[in-house]
Amino acid sequence: MSDTNVNDYPLLARPHIHLTGPVDHAMYANFREQLLNAPAEGPLVVSISTLGGDPEVARAMGDDIRLLRDYTGREALFLGKVAVYSAGSTFMSAFQVNKRFLTKGTRLMLHERQMTSTIELSGPLKMLVATLKAKLHEIETSVEIEEEGFRAIVAGSQVPFEELVEKAPANWYIGAEEAKERGLVLDVI
């Protein structure tokens, strides 16, 4: 069990941005609005609780955090609460491991990207080849993006990229204390 004193991280008690629910365009709009209304000075604390959603929206929110950090030098802290699944973990990967926190009992869930698609083949044969190549390129690019995200989430931790790749197909659930022990987050509060 964590021996963290709540007084160690007083900023985490009052996050500037609160995100809950599915990671989607509505969450992104809410995130942008809260970001604009957050204090312009000092560390920015972002909390999230989500069962997942659109990984590209999570990447866009993460890019906003990265740009804020890179261009203003502002510190951004991540606080995962209760459930940080799928796209929520993708968002978490935008924060350095020493800026990530989870509340007690929180679970992370990491998995491979999903795709559901139907390809209907009808028409000239050359067009069918182009259709199949286009779908293959979409899948290959999605795998590249997935691997970039996996590398970002384990960067600076004791979790090897290969372990995440091995466990992700079966949905890897990681409790807060294990996430701390493995260096995926700085602390559990």
Image (spheres, rainbow, N blue to C red):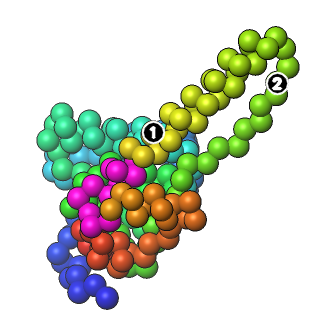
> The disc labelled 2 sits on which kind of residue?
Leu
Is residue 164 inside the magenta stretch? no
Segment colored magenta: 149-159
Kindly give the residue lying farthest to the right in the view shown.
Answer: 122
Question: Left or right: where does residue 13 sit relative to residue 145?
Answer: left
What percent of the width, then of the height, locates residue 142?
Answer: 52, 38
Which comes before the other along the chain, label 2 or label 1?
Answer: 2
* Callout count: 2
Quarter of the image where the C terminus is located: bottom left
Q: Image point 58% across, 31% down: which residue?
A: 138
What residue is pinned by disc 1?
Answer: 144
Q: Image point 72% across, 38% down: which residue?
A: 117
Quarter of the image where the N terminus is located: bottom left
Q: Which of the pair 124/171 is nearer the observer? A: 124
**Proximity of marks 2 and 1: CB atoms separated by less than 8 Å:** no
What percent of the width, then of the height, locates residue 186?
Answer: 24, 68
Q: Which mark is residue 136?
A: none
What residue is pinned by disc 2?
Answer: 121
Secondary structure at numbered mark 1: helix
> The disc labelled 1 sits on which kind of residue?
Glu
